[in-house]
Amino acid sequence: MVANRSFILGTLLARVFANPITPVPEENEAAVLSARQAGSGVHLVNCGNSYSTVVYCINDSNCNFYPAKENQCIMGISGLFKWEGVQGPVLKGCTFSTGVRFEWGISPLPNIPVYAEVGPGQNGFQTFKCFKDNKRTMYSDGLNQCKSIYYCLPR
Ligand SMILES: *[C@@H]1O[C@H](CO)[C@@H](O)[C@H](O)[C@H]1NC(C)=O
């Protein structure tokens, strides 16, 4: 089951990584932004240069606050996590305290434009599309500004 999902995502990843990333046209950018208003989202966040965390937002247009414990999944405390690429044959991911694991495959290509689609995500219940974000500050943890690097929306 897990292997099968990984296989499907591997195929998606191969497709995403094989194709050059095209800039999102202006009108699609508006569509992307309005899709963000519609529901939940997952953000891949860097807090200063200190640590990286995955933040789940039940309402993605109301997500600029310090996340509840069950809605953030910290990627270790020794520096920023490299979001892009895969870890060997498996997707990168993080298991929340709720037991839900979110996984993603972000294209490692350089110079991808902001808001371009960069790869798939999944949480075991839904599949997601991930996009490059504009590094806006979502919240402060008291010491660091926590900035959205990528965001993923349910398909
Ligand atoms: C999501 O947040 C926006 C902005 O605060 C709000 O206008 C909207 O009603 C919220 N949606 C839901 C479903 O709560």
Image (cartoon, grey):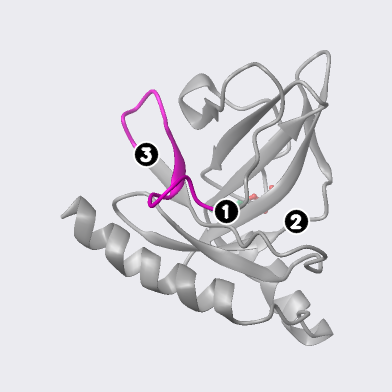
Q: Which residue is mark 2?
A: 133
The label nearer to you, 3 versus 1, is 1
Placement of the N terminus among the 4 image quadrants: bottom left
Residue in the image at 57% along x and 36% along y: 54
Q: Assign a secondary structure to mark 1.
A: loop
The type of residue carrying mark 1 is Gly
Q: Which residue is mark 1?
A: 85
At which x and y percent is residue 74?
56, 25
Give whichever of 104, 144 is nearer the camera: 104
Label 1 CB, ligand 1: below 8 Å? Answer: no
Give whichever of 132, 125 is nearer the camera: 132
The type of residue carrying mark 2 is Asp
Task: Name the N-terminal-most of marks 1 and 2.
Answer: 1
Above or below — where is 154 with respect to 28? Answer: above
Q: Which residues are magenta?
A: 85-100
Mark 3 and mark 1: Cα distance apart in space = 18 Å
Residue in the image at 71% along x and 22% along y: 79
- Outermost residue, left side: 1
- Outermost residue, front side: 88
Task: Name the N-terminal-most of marks 3 and 1.
Answer: 1
Q: Which mark is residue 101?
A: 3
